[in-house]
Image (cartoon, rainbow, N blue to C red):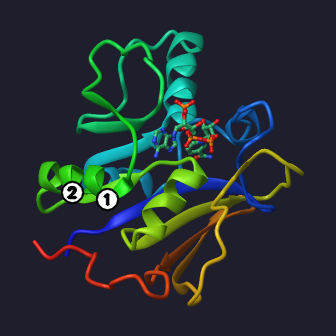
Amino acid sequence: MAKTIYFTASSLDGYIADSNHSLDWLFQFGEAGPPSYEAFIRDIGAIAMGAKTYEWIARYLVASNESDWPYHVPTWVFTHRDLPPIAGAEVRFVQGAAASVHAAMCEAAGERNCWIAGGGDLVGQFYDAGLLNEIIVQVAPLTLGGGAPLLPRRIHPPLELTRVDDYGGGFVELRYTVSPPEGVRSDSARSV
Ligand SMILES: NC(=O)c1ccc[n+]([C@@H]2O[C@H](COP(=O)([O-])OP(=O)(O)OC[C@H]3O[C@@H](n4cnc5c(N)ncnc54)[C@H](OP(=O)(O)O)[C@@H]3O)[C@@H](O)[C@H]2O)c1
């Protein structure tokens, strides 16, 4: 069954970027990404992200002299603005409800999973609609004291912890199965 997954790195105190929208705190550990990334991205058929995350990627490509958009599947970017496109990126700019975008993502992804890349409130919008199935988070051994929150929602019923991996260097990866919010239909996990 294909899933909709939030895969991200976080500080121990629950921030995915610092208050300047910087990821320097994460990249000090190296830019290769977690060991699980390759297998994760292989099974991804569609991506959604918020405007700030898209803008961060655009800045990163310029700063690192990279020219290539890093993803090879369609990406939906939520924004109320006319953001500049990135050459080679298969991106659709959208706004509004997560549910209608999710339907288009599922159609594009087919049997593969959907990745909600962040930020946290956008992931929360998918959660609110009962569309989030799993959270995979790499927790870095530091705190930031503020910044962009991991997932600014009060989640009931509790998440189910399904796996813990120790990546060394103080990093752990936690996987949780997410149940829909109370009162929201639980049939949102797709069967394909
Ligand atoms: N640690 C990691 O692995 C990781 C992963 C992902 C992201 N990040 C970083 O975390 C930070 C995330 O920042 P963030 O939480 O502020 O946000 P974000 O989700 O990337 O962007 C928020 C913006 O998305 C737009 N948006 C959200 N929902 C919308 C909707 N339903 N309809 C239309 N537009 C919508 C709005 O942009 P408008 O201004 O257009 O209204 C909103 O201000 C970024 O710095 C990113 O680089 C880190």
Q: Residue at x 38, y 52 (%)?
A: 97
Q: For the residues marked 1 and 2, what is the alpha-carbon distance in whole angstroms?
A: 6 Å
Seen from this angle, which residue lies furthest right?
145
Indicate left or right for 111 with 89 as reference.
left
Quadrant including the C terminus:
bottom left
**SS under mark 1:** helix
Q: Tell me the quarter of the picture where residue 90 sits.
A: top left
- Residue at left offset 54%, top offset 61%: 124
Q: Is residue 22 above or below residue 117?
A: above
185 vs 60, nearest the viewer:
185
Mark 2 and mark 1 in contact (Cβ < 8 Å)?
yes
Question: Looking at the picture, which amino acid does disc 1 mark?
Answer: Ala
Amino acid identity at mark 2: Ala
- Residue at point 33%, 45% (across, down): 47
Q: Read off the residue under disc 2.
A: 103
Residue where numbered disc 1 is placed: 99
Q: Secondary structure at mark 2?
A: helix
On the image, the x and y values in percent for residue 174 come to 58, 72
Q: Position of residue 191 (x, y in %)?
A: 14, 76
Locate residue 139: give its quadrant.
Answer: bottom right
